[in-house]
Image (tube, helix red, strand yellow):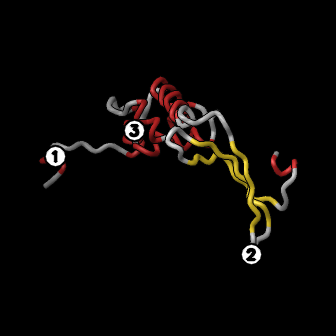
């Protein structure tokens, strides 16, 4: 079969790529995007909307409007801070000495949630416990 028999029309790669970039899929909601980019927000709260648009292009091979990416960023930030809503307002700090070939001190800051589950906030391994190591 030839291209004419199938009724297909081929375009060059530049036109195909620009068509994909212009395609802003209407079923790609901002809440779905926010679930997909929450790891970016957790690493950098100041991420720009243009970076989110690029990430959507990489993840889903489709474009995204600025407004949809802005709302996705907003929802992702809410999802990151939602984890702290049900925690008790007390932060516990503790340390333990490491034994074996790797000497040092493990410092940990944690909280307890409403179900009495341990919720770690941060940890660090330092040479010795001092006021400088807690900073």
Q: Residue at x 76, y 76 (%)?
A: 101
Q: Residue 133's spot in the image, x, y percent? A: 83, 51
Q: Residue 11's spot in the image, x, y percent? A: 32, 43
Q: Residue 37's spot in the image, x, y percent? A: 50, 40
119 over 114 or under it: above or below? below
Any mark on residue 62, and which?
A: 3
From the viewer's perspective, is the residue at label 1 or at label 2 nearer?
Answer: 2
Q: Which residue is mark 1?
A: 4
Q: Residue at x 51, y 40 (%)?
A: 38
Q: Locate residue 32 relative to residue 109 in the image: left or right.
A: left
69 over 111 or under it: above or below? above
Q: Which residue is mark 2?
A: 100
Q: CA distance from mark 1 to mark 3?
A: 29 Å
Image quarter hosting the N terminus: bottom left
Q: CA distance from mark 1 to mark 2?
A: 74 Å
- Category of crowding for the residue at label 2, using alpha-carbon neighbours closer than 10 angstroms: few (below 14), some (14–19), many (at least 20): few
> Which picture quadrant has residue 105?
bottom right
- Category of crowding for the residue at label 1, using alpha-carbon neighbours closer than 10 angstroms: few (below 14), some (14–19), many (at least 20): few
* Residue lying furthest top: 67
Front in this rendered view, residue 95 or 126:
95
> Which picture quadrant has residue 18?
top left
Dot 1 or dot 2, earlier in sequence:
1
């Amino acid at each position: 079969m030839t291209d004419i028999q199938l009724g297909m029309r081929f375009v060059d790669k530049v036109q195909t790529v620009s068509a994909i970039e212009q395609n802003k899929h209407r079923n790609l909601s901002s809440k779905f995007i926010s679930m997909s980019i929450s790891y970016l927000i957790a690493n950098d709260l100041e991420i720009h909307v243009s970076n989110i648009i690029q990430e959507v292009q990489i993840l889903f091979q489709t474009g995204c409007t600025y407004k949809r990416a802005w709302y996705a960023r907003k929802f992702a930030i809410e999802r990151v801070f939602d984890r702290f809503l049900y925690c008790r307002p007390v932060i516990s700090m503790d340390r333990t000495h490491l034994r074996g070939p790797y000497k040092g001190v493990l410092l940990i800051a944690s909280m307890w949630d409403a179900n009495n589950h341990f919720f770690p906030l941060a940890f660090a391994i330092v040479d010795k416990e001092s006021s400088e190591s807690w900073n």
